[in-house]
């Protein structure tokens, strides 16, 4: 399809919280933009498939390696710690190197450590490998977010970022449901080796095919490209830490994501073994049940991303971010409270599926607002947000078995998660996407955006 190279200024949504006109961007053809989205959705699927696989293979690994439940909590926690430690440096690399090089490197190394997981011989080595796996995987979502910031129009980013994260839920759902089958047929060691090979293949294709910014049109003087591409070669790269630390948005965005991932991470750590032990069902049955909340979350991300873009186009910029997130955290709170009292796995999973649906309604707004507020530092801001999410995951993975050991049930854990979600819902009332970290990016938001006309 031939792109018509006529350019026109388009008015942005008119509304109380909307920018007067879109920011300036360099635009690629629509087909190419959505090919980029498809590529990052695939790596999102593979990334979380590799992460969730250890939960589905937990029983067989624990038996072969002689690992207790408390010790396996350290295995889950080691990943979350490594994920949190290296998240911000990976976001800096996304903004400094560009997503082509940084994402290829991240995917290559998490693939390598996934493969090595299949070769471990004891708990110490497993904890070490999962820590380095977390370090390597930390960059995937900030770097993919930077790629989508570079390539997608503002009115498309909600859906694009929703689809990126939807890939993670589908990967986790497939991993929890299918890994027991592959473990039974191939063995858990061979299953991890196979996943690692798939990741290496994706990294090679990405590095060969992707470019850091669109090059459909020759860049003219009136088109700002700094907000969509990596820094130019030789330019001095500095992070405006003072702007980050003095921004109210910064702290609100970080906290609400901590609450979101505290609640969600149970899906990727303890949900399958918990279902198996509490309701005395097989690993295969528990895997199928555990995949249901993840499918619910995937649908929520798709719906939330579409809603974000639809409300944004109507002119209500702030509402397009806050409404899906506030509704989501409210739903999660309501669904969490009765879950501990469910006597059958079907009713428990129904409650937890609604919980996951709720917190995942907030995912697309969270990553989209990082592009709004972060601007040319969206990789760094999204990495900082995801670091807090990883800390929520770490606390969740360690606290869940401890609270069950102290109280004999999950009521206290779910009560803590509900409280965190209530506070996160309040945070979204005060997050303002029009307040960028840098004055320069605020000026860009009040500038003109040039879009191509596509047939």
Image: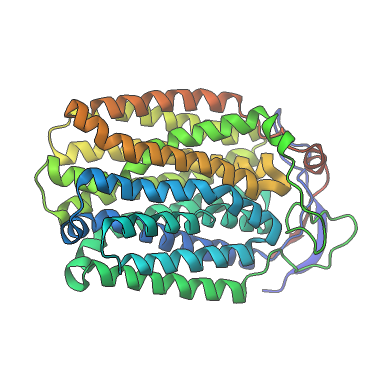
Q: Nearer the viewer, residue 226 or 2?
A: 226
**Quarter occupied by residue 270:** top left
The image shows residue 181, relative to residue 94, as above or below, that is below
Q: Is residue 301 left or right of residue 104?
A: left
Please state the horizontal and vertical placement of residue 298, each as a whole percent of the image.
40, 49
The image shows residue 166, relative to residue 324, as above or below, that is below
Q: How is the image coloured?
A: rainbow
Q: How many marks?
A: 0
Residue 268 visible in this rendered orientation of the protein: no
Please state the horizontal and vertical placement of residue 333, each as a whole percent of the image.
36, 27
Q: Nearer the viewer, residue 201 or 346?
A: 201
Assign the C terminus to one quadrant of the image: bottom right
Residue at screen point 46% across, 43% down: 390
Q: Is residue 330 left or right of residue 232?
A: left
Residue at screen point 39% across, 52% down: 169
The furthest residue to the right: 221
Q: Is residue 225 left or right of residue 191?
A: right
Please state the horizontal and vertical placement of residue 301, each as a whole percent of the image.
45, 46
Residue at screen point 80% across, 64% down: 233
The image shows residue 198, relative to residue 403, as above or below, that is below
The furthest residue to the left: 280
The image shows residue 418, relative to residue 380, as above or below, that is above
Residue at screen point 67% across, 69% down: 211
Assign the N terminus to one quadrant of the image: bottom right
Please state the horizontal and vertical placement of residue 90, each as a whole percent of the image.
59, 54
Residue 280 visible in this rendered orientation of the protein: yes
């Amino acid at each position: 399809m031939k792109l018509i190279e006529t350019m026109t200024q388009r008015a942005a949504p008119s509304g109380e919280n909307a920018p007067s006109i879109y920011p300036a961007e360099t635009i690629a053809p629509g087909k190419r933009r959505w090919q980029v989205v498809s590529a990052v959705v695939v790596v999102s699927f593979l990334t979380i498939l590799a992460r969730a696989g250890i939960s589905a293979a937990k029983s067989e690994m624990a038996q072969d390696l002689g690992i207790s439940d408390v010790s396996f909590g350290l295995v889950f926690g080691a990943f979350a710690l490594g994920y949190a430690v290296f998240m911000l440096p990976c976001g800096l690399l996304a903004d400094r190197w560009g997503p082509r090089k940084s994402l290829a490197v991240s995917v290559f190394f998490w693939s390598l450590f996934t493969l090595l997981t299949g070769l471990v011989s004891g708990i110490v080595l497993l904890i070490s490998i999962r820590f380095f796996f977390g370090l390597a995987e930390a960059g995937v979502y900030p770097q993919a977010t930077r790629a989508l910031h570079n390539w997608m129009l503002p009115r498309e980013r909600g859906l694009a970022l929703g689809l990126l994260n939807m890939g993670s839920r589908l990967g986790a759902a497939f991993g929890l449901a299918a890994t027991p089958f592959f473990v039974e047929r191939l063995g858990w060691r061979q299953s991890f080796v196979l996943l690692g090979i798939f990741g290496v293949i994706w990294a090679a294709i990405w590095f060969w095919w992707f470019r850091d910014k669109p090059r459909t049109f020759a860049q003219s003087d009136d088109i700002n490209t700094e907000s969509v591409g990596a820094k130019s070669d030789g330019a001095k790269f500095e992070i405006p830490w003072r702007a980050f630390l003095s921004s109210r948005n910064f702290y609100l965005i970080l906290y609400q994501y901590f609450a979101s991932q505290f609640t969600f991470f149970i899906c990727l750590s303890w949900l399958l073994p918990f279902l198996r032990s509490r309701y005395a069902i097989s690993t295969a049955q528990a895997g199928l049940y555990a995949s249901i909340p993840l499918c619910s979350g995937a649908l929520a991300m798709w719906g939330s991303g579409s809603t974000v873009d639809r409300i944004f186009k109507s002119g209500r910029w702030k509402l397009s971010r806050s409404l899906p997130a506030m509704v989501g955290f409210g739903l999660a709170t309501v669904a969490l409270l009765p879950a501990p009292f469910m006597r059958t796995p079907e009713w428990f999973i129904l409650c937890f599926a609604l919980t996951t649906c709720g917190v995942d309604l907030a995912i697309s707004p969270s990553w989209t607002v990082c592009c709004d507020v972060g601007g040319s530092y969206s990789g760094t801001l999204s990495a900082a947000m995801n670091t807090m999410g990883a800390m929520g995951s770490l606390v969740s993975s360690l606290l869940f078995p401890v609270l069950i050991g102290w109280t004999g049930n999950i009521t206290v854990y779910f009560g803590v998660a509900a409280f965190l979600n209530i506070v996160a819902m309040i945070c979204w009332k005060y997050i303002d996407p029009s307040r960028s970290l840098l004055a320069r990016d605020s000026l860009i938001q009040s500038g003109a955006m040039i879009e191509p006309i596509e047939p």
